[in-house]
Image (spheres, rainbow, N blue to C red):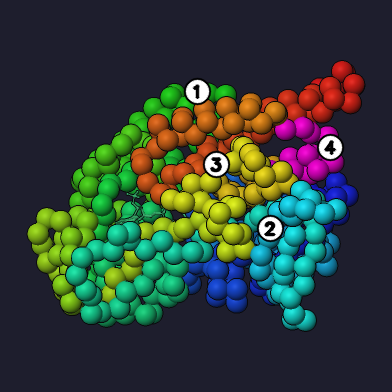
Amino acid sequence: MKALADANVAFDCFEASDRVGGNWVFGNKNGMSSAYEGLYINTSRDRMQYADYPMPKSYPDFPHHTQIAAYFNDYVDHFGLRRRISFETEVLHADLVHEGENRGKWRVRVRDKGGAWERVYDGILVANGHHWDPLWPEPAYPGTFDGTQLHAHHYRSKDTLRGKRVLVVGMGNSAMDIAVEASEVGAKSFLAARRGAYVIPKYIFGKPLDQHVTTARIPWSVRRRAMEVIHHLVVGDMERYGLPKPDHRFGDAHPTVSSRILDRLVHGAITPKPNVAELLGKQVRFADGSVEDVDVIIWCTGYKVTFPFFDPTLVSAPNNDLPLFKRVFHPSLPGLMFLGLLQPIGAVMPLAEAQGKWIAKYLRHEYELPPPAEMRRTMDEERERMFARYVKSKRHTMEVDFDDYLLDLEHEIRRGKRRSAHRRGDHHAT
Ligand SMILES: NC(=O)C1=CN([C@@H]2O[C@H](COP(=O)(O)OP(=O)(O)OC[C@H]3O[C@@H](n4cnc5c(N)ncnc54)[C@H](OP(=O)(O)O)[C@@H]3O)[C@@H](O)[C@H]2O)C=CC1
């Protein structure tokens, strides 16, 4: 929105909630926040802030969710953007117009307090987030469970776990945070994983982990080796903590970041377990045959990529996979763009900021996309590389390396500017 406003591109911005901040608004009335009371971000302040609006220096390196929500709030006020947002306006449907004078444009139906209405646009930017629609285990585990089951999306406060025997399933960042909270108040905290992960502390050698080796100019293989050695020196083998040995190399899975889980494990406050095998009423049997009494299961099994306003035959992400040109442009639906629909190894905000600037250039015809065949080829090559590197999982369908992605966009914008200049007959553009 900021980039479009700066570029004088006319736009409407619809927000289902009564405020900005999305996932970072605890208890967001749009029902789409997965934030819990004890949520602190795991990317550092200096690496996640927008380039044109630094986070307050009074913020800690890893701010609390209330601080991040306040930052977004201040951002829109600082740049005078609040009046440009239609709050409490839900997008009901978006479709490509196939006939008449609006052929090729997008018809968007929304509902606000006054009722439903529609408008036609040249393009739409989808920024509906991808960490709000719970992915429960698929297929479900055999058996039935008589205690309480919830998905991480619905977890709000450790108070609900007081005195309970809690089983947390998963090895992602939700699982780490929630297992630690369960260990603080529960009678017992189990952590079950179907696959190991390299747990990375938030701080390494006295600074936030994401502030080490921050250049795409060093080849990935060298950066990976450096991080592998550092991890080995600082943390060591995951099996020493009772966790499964990762079945992949460092950097081939979305990072699991937690300084606290290792501490709780070595104090015996969390009991690691292999994967769930069967639900047995008030008990759970694990893959090693052990059986435990459990009151609450929290499935920290990730999220689905969903667009409730598109007809799924037009746009959907089966198995969380929606191929896009550089994670922004739909390759066959002109005018359809996505923001923040990527899983960075690092923070998402600066990448969304760069995407916004790129989209603004495209909409102002200062940038031209490559021809469709070239776009497809680039996408195929990038996807092949990503799938070859990452563990096969629904959580690894749109991974990008923070610094590499920013550099790549820079290069792509330059290429697209040249294409655009060439079309206009101006051969001196850089
Ligand atoms: N403090 C912070 O900043 C936090 C950030 N986040 C972010 O939110 C996003 C979502 O994180 P999260 O909610 O952890 O989800 P993730 O998708 O990152 O992790 C899901 C985990 O559940 C496992 N899993 C999935 N299905 C099953 C199954 N059927 N049985 C057993 N295990 C299963 C996955 O294993 P496998 O790898 O085998 O698929 C993986 O370990 C991430 O980007 C994360 O970084 C989340 C929480 C806190």
Task: Check whether the beta carbons of the residues at disc 2 and disc 4 lie within 8 A of each other.
Answer: no
Q: Which mark is residue 219?
A: 1
Identified at 41% across, 58% down, the residue is 302
Extreme residue toward the left, this view = 289
Q: Are marks 2 and 1 in contact (CB under 8 Å)?
A: no
The secondary structure type at the circle numbered 2 is strand
Q: Which residue is pictured at 29% across the width and 71% down the height?
A: 297
Q: Nearer the viewer, mark 2 or mark 4?
A: 2
Q: Amino acid at mark 4?
A: His
Q: Disc 3 residue type?
A: Pro
Q: Nearer the viewer, mark 2 or mark 1?
A: 2
| Rendered position, 141 above or below 416 | below
- In the image, is the residue at mark 4 within 8 Å of ligand 1 by its beta carbon? no
- The amino acid type of the residue labelled 2 equals Asp
Ligand 1 closer than 8 Å to label 1 CB? no
Q: Position of residue 337 (x, y in %)?
A: 68, 47
Task: Tell me the tag on residue 323.
Answer: 3
- Find numbered disc 3 in the image and state the secondary structure of the residue it sits on: loop
Q: Secondary structure at mark 4?
A: loop
Residue occupied by mark 4:
365
Query: Under tag 1, what secondary structure?
Result: loop
